[in-house]
Image: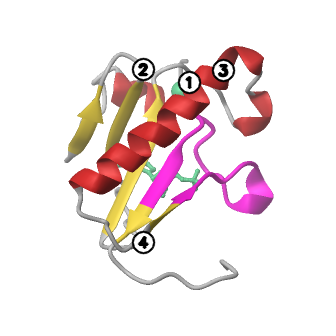
Amino acid sequence: MKDCIFCKIIAGEIPVKTKVFEDDKVFAFEDINPQAPVHILIVPKKHISCLNEASNENLELLGYIQLAASQIAKQKGLEGGYRLVNNCGADAGQTVFHIHYHLLGGRVFAWPPG
Ligand code: 5GP
Ligand code: ZN
């Protein structure tokens, strides 16, 4: 989608420092402003603005992203655990309106989140 920063990253129009994983469905790269020693964004190649815009058509893709996250967490050695976060909507802190999941690890996280 035009004017979407993550679509531009996926298309290679905006370079990312560290691509972590790519296949035909998802693109994963390090967050530019990491909140943990490991902070990777896992983004579907298909533009969906947020979880509320997803439908039954996207069921398989959403499951696929979670399994990709667990594979990446294994590759990154996050045996102690990790957090997979989706911010949906402004109140949750979503700033990029192309659905994505934050894979956070490498430190101990508090609960409840801020
Ligand atoms: P949100 O706040 O929407 O849940 O997450 C958006 C995330 O995208 C933020 O953590 C932000 O640091 C990251 N981000 C925004 N622009 C870029 C960029 O150009 N490159 C990378 N690698 N991350 C970005
Ligand atoms: Zn997009």
Q: Amino acid at mark 2?
A: Lys
Q: Does any atom of ligand 1 lie closer than 8 Å to the CB of label 4?
A: yes
Q: Secondary structure at mark 2?
A: loop
Between the residue at mark 3 and the residue at mark 4, the CA separation in whole angstroms equals 28 Å
Q: Nearer the viewer, mark 1 or mark 4?
A: 1
Query: Which residue, given by chain and number where applicable, does mark 1 sit on?
Result: 61
Residue for point 69% across, 37% down: 50
> Under tag 1, what secondary structure?
helix
Element marked by disc 3: helix
Q: Where does label 3 land, which residue?
A: 58
- 9 in relation to 91, above or below: above
Picture quadrant of ligand 2? top right
Does label 1 or label 4 sit earlier along the sequence? 4
3 or 4: tag closer to the N-terminus? 4
- Crowdedness of circle 2 by 10 Å Cα count: few (<14), some, many (20+)? few
Residue at x 70% of width, y 81% of height: 112
Q: Quadrant of the N terminus?
A: top right
Gap between marks 1 and 3, in whole Å? 5 Å
- Cα separation between marks 2 and 4: 25 Å
Say which quarter of the image contains residue 39.
Answer: bottom left
**The stretch drawn in magenta includes residue 100:** yes
Q: Which mark is residue 40?
A: none
Disc 1 residue type? Answer: Leu
- Whether residues under marks 1 and 3 lie with C-beta atoms below 8 angstroms apart, the answer is yes
Q: Locate the C terminus and report the quarter of the image it occupies.
A: bottom right
Q: Give the main secondary structure, helix, strand or loop, of the magenta stretch.
A: loop
Q: To which residue does mark 2 refer? A: 25
